[in-house]
Amino acid sequence: MKLVIVTVVEEFQQDVLKLFKNAEIENFSSSDIDGYKNGSSVLMASNWFSAGKGGNESSMFFSFAEEDNIDHLFDLIKEFNSNLETNNPIKAVVVPIEKSI
């Protein structure tokens, strides 16, 4: 069992849900997050007088899943990203689990 973490801009949230389903990862959690591309956005967002938007509305999904399902998910994400016309690919990482209860 491993932990997979996926981040995506809000525009592709429904696509990620389909990818999880196709990879047979049915148990997962999600959270709304603000995504930043560079340090200046973070500094601007922390300024009380900033009139600009601080970050991009994004989502983070995570699941404890079997390695085979995660491998399939990564294949699906690679295929999805190869067909994108934007500069906001789906990002994913895998974290090994040393202990669990």
Image: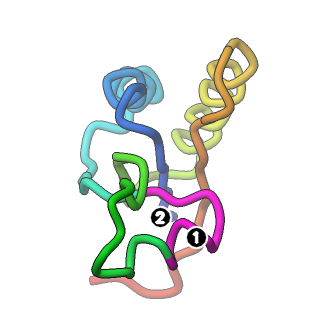
Question: Which quadrant, please, contains the C terminus?
Answer: bottom left
Location of residue 13 in the rendering, given as x and y in whole percent from the top left corner: 35, 31
Task: Check disc 2: other Cα within 10 Å, few if <14, some if 14-19, many if 20+.
Answer: some
Mark toward the start of the polypeptide (1 vs 2): 2
Decide whether residue 73 is among the magenta residues.
Answer: no
Location of residue 30 in the rendering, given as x and y in whole percent from the top left corner: 26, 52
Colour scheme of the picture: rainbow
Compared to 62, does 72 lie above or below? above
Front residue (pair 29, 39) = 39
Compared to 22, does 91 lie above or below? below
Residue 74 quadrant: top right
Marking on residue 3: 2
Q: Amino acid at mark 1?
A: Val
Q: Amino acid at mark 2?
A: Leu
Task: Check disc 1: other Cα within 10 Å, few if <14, some if 14-19, many if 20+.
Answer: few
Query: On the image, numbered disc 1 is attached to which residue?
Result: 95
Label 1 to label 2: alpha-carbon separation:
5 Å
**Residue 43 located left or right of residue 76:** left
Compared to 35, does 15 lie above or below? above
**Residue 84 located left or right of residue 2:** right
Q: Secondary structure at mark 1?
A: strand
Compared to 51, does 98 lie above or below? below
Circles 1 and 2: CB atoms closer than 8 Å: yes
Location of residue 8 in the rendering, given as x and y in whole percent from the top left corner: 47, 42
Q: Secondary structure at mark 2?
A: strand
**Residue 47 located left or right of residue 66:** left
Residue 53 quadrant: bottom left
Numbered range of the magenta stretch: 35-43
Location of residue 23 in the rendering, given as x and y in whole percent from the top left corner: 47, 28
Front residue (pair 50, 24) = 50
What residue is rendered at 42% in x and 56% in y? 55
What residue is rendered at 61% in x and 24% in y? 76
